């Protein structure tokens, strides 16, 4: 949400909490509707009541599935991906990392953050220290500001593999480059997304 990128409680922009009072009224309206419907069906036959119940349940399930699908497509920016399925890492390397106990991106970043432990993890995974440093940088980018695996792969096509690489861009320039790459469907909020990604990163000239 423009202007609310940093004003959040957990992941909810403060303005988003204004939606709860209308939602509460919607819930009251639904309960009142169901109560009225139940009263009118009370004197109907059992077959009719069961038919109405089955139809209502089917419509509710179908409506819920449609709403969730539309919400995911519109509002979800990235999905959590365990290390074994991170496509920013080579398949053989991510399997080796997961088998060594680094199943989650967060655990991988924590484990590989200290240079002193890289040699130990190199022995456990069979990967070179250089490769581990590179993988650490890529996974840190995936975790940065909810960026996610898909967008990290998209940024990789622009030569951006780490947060340090990302810091060298401006939001408008980055959004333009992503649109020009056309690897993903055009998104109307790329400038806002890029602005969020570049927050809290050191500005590089």
Image (cartoon, rainbow, N blue to C red):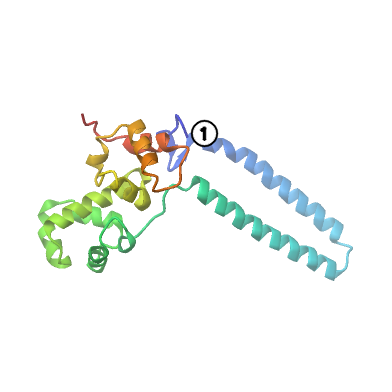
Q: Residue sitting at 79 percent across and 68 percent down?
A: 50
Q: Position of residue 11 (x, y in %)?
A: 44, 43
Graded by Cα atoms within 10 Å as few (under 14), some (14 to 19) or many (20 or more), the crowding at tag 1 reads few
The quadrant of the image that shows the C terminus is: top left
Coordinates of residue 26 in the picture (x, y in percent): 68, 44
Q: Secondary structure at mark 1?
A: helix
The relative height of residue 91 versus residue 205 in the rendered view (above or below) is: below
Quarter-of-image position of residue 80: bottom left
The picture quadrant where one finds residue 182 is top left
Q: Which residue is mark 1?
A: 15
Compared with 72, 9 (above or below) is: above
Q: Quadrant of residue 195?
A: top left
Residue 168: image x %, image y %? 24, 35
Residue drawn 33% across the image and 36% down it:
174
The one nearer the camera, 95 or 154, is 154
What residue is rendered at 81% in x and 52% in y? Answer: 36
Numbered circles on residues, count: 1
Residue at the location (26% across, 63% down)?
94
Find residue 155 and report its horizontal and vertical position in percent: 31, 45
Q: Is 129 on the left or on the right of 98, as rendered?
A: left
Which residue lies most toward the right here? 43
Q: Is residue 172 above or below residue 76?
A: above
């Amino acid at each position: 949400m423009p202007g609310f990128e940093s004003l959040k409680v957990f992941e909810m922009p403060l303005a988003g909490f204004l939606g709860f009072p209308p939602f509460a009224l919607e819930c009251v309206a639904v309960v009142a509707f169901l109560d009225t419907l139940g009263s009118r069906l009370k004197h109907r036959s059992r077959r009719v009541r069961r038919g109405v119940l089955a139809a209502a349940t089917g419509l509710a399930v179908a409506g819920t599935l449609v709403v969730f699908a539309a919400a995911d497509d519109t509002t979800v920016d990235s999905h959590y991906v365990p290390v074994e399925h991170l496509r920013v890492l080579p398949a053989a390397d991510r399997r080796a990392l997961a088998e060594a106990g680094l199943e989650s991106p967060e655990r991988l970043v924590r484990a590989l953050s200290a240079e002193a432990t890289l040699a130990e993890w190199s022995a456990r995974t069979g990967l070179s220290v250089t490769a581990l440093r590179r993988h650490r940088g890529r996974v840190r980018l995936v975790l940065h500001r909810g960026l996610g695996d898909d967008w990290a792969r998209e940024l990789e096509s622009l030569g951006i593999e780490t947060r340090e690489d990302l810091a060298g861009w401006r939001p408008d320039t980055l959004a333009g480059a992503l649109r020009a790459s056309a690897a993903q469907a055009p998104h109307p909020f790329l400038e806002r997304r890029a602005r969020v990604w570049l927050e809290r990163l050191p500005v590089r000239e």
